[in-house]
Image (tube, rainbow, N blue to C red):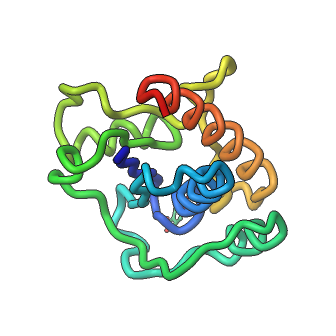
């Protein structure tokens, strides 16, 4: 079982989007039983809150299902629990490492690290552009899945 934790600042826009996009990708390939996928925040700002309506609208438009979600903050123990901890941008990776400590097992990556065009995923909380964020999240999730399938021989 490959365990992946997607992380953003608030855990209401980008990381739940990545969580449910990734869940849908593995479901379409009928390999969902090989994965445990979740998401979390670095900040305490939105703890307990549901997915942002902008993310829900975009997921609805793309026919990607989502279910019950309450934002939670990443905790130190998550580092041992997960195989991959996937942040959205450089600041995000720093905030993750402040909480979990040094990345001794090289588990922490930016989602678009796996793209030939490595870049941050813009925060739609500030940009209002959920379409652009979705395109980037889909690219990152697709390439992350390819990477994982290769290294785990799935
Ligand atoms: P997210 O977006 O990190 O993609 O979930 C944000 C959500 C809430 C806040 C910031 C970013 N906030 O400051 O409350």
118 relative to 94, above or below:
above
111 relative to 64, above or below:
above
Q: Nearer the viewer, residue 25 or 136?
A: 25
20 relative to 123, above or below:
below
Question: Whole-percent x and y of residue 28?
Answer: 68, 54
Question: Whole-percent x and y of residue 87?
Answer: 45, 42
Q: Give the quarter of the image for residue 102.
A: top left
Instruction: Residue at 31%, 40% (x, y): give it.
Output: 83
Instruction: Residue at 57%, 25% (x, y): give it.
Output: 114
Instruction: Residue at 40%, 48% (x, y): give it.
Output: 4
122 relative to 115, above or below:
below
Q: Give the quarter of the image for residue 109.
A: top left
Instruction: Residue at 73%, 52% (x, y): give it.
Output: 134
User: How many marks are shown on the rendered structure?
Assistant: 0
Position of 104 with respect to 122 (left or right) is left
Question: Whole-percent x and y of residue 6?
Answer: 45, 51
Q: Give the quarter of the image for residue 115.
A: top right
Question: Whole-percent x and y of residue 48?
Answer: 39, 81
Position of 143 with respect to 82 (left or right) is right
Position of 138 with respect to 111 (left or right) is right
């Amino acid at each position: 079982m490959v365990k992946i934790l997607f992380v953003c600042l608030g855990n209401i826009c980008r990381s739940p989007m990545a969580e449910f996009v990734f869940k849908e990708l593995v479901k379409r390939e009928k390999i969902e039983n090989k994965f445990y996928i979740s998401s979390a925040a670095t900040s305490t700002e939105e703890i307990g809150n549901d997915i942002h309506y902008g993310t829900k609208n975009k997921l609805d438009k793309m026919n990607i299902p989502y279910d019950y979600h309450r934002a939670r903050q990443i905790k130190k123990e998550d580092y041992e629990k997960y195989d991959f901890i996937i942040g959205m941008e450089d600041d995000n990776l720093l905030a993750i490492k402040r909480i979990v400590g040094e990345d001794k097992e090289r588990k922490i990556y930016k989602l678009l690290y796996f793209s030939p065009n490595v870049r941050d995923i813009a925060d739609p909380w500030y940009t209002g552009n959920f379409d652009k964020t979705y395109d980037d999240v889909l690219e990152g999730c697709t390439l992350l899945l390819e990477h994982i399938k290769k290294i785990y021989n799935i």
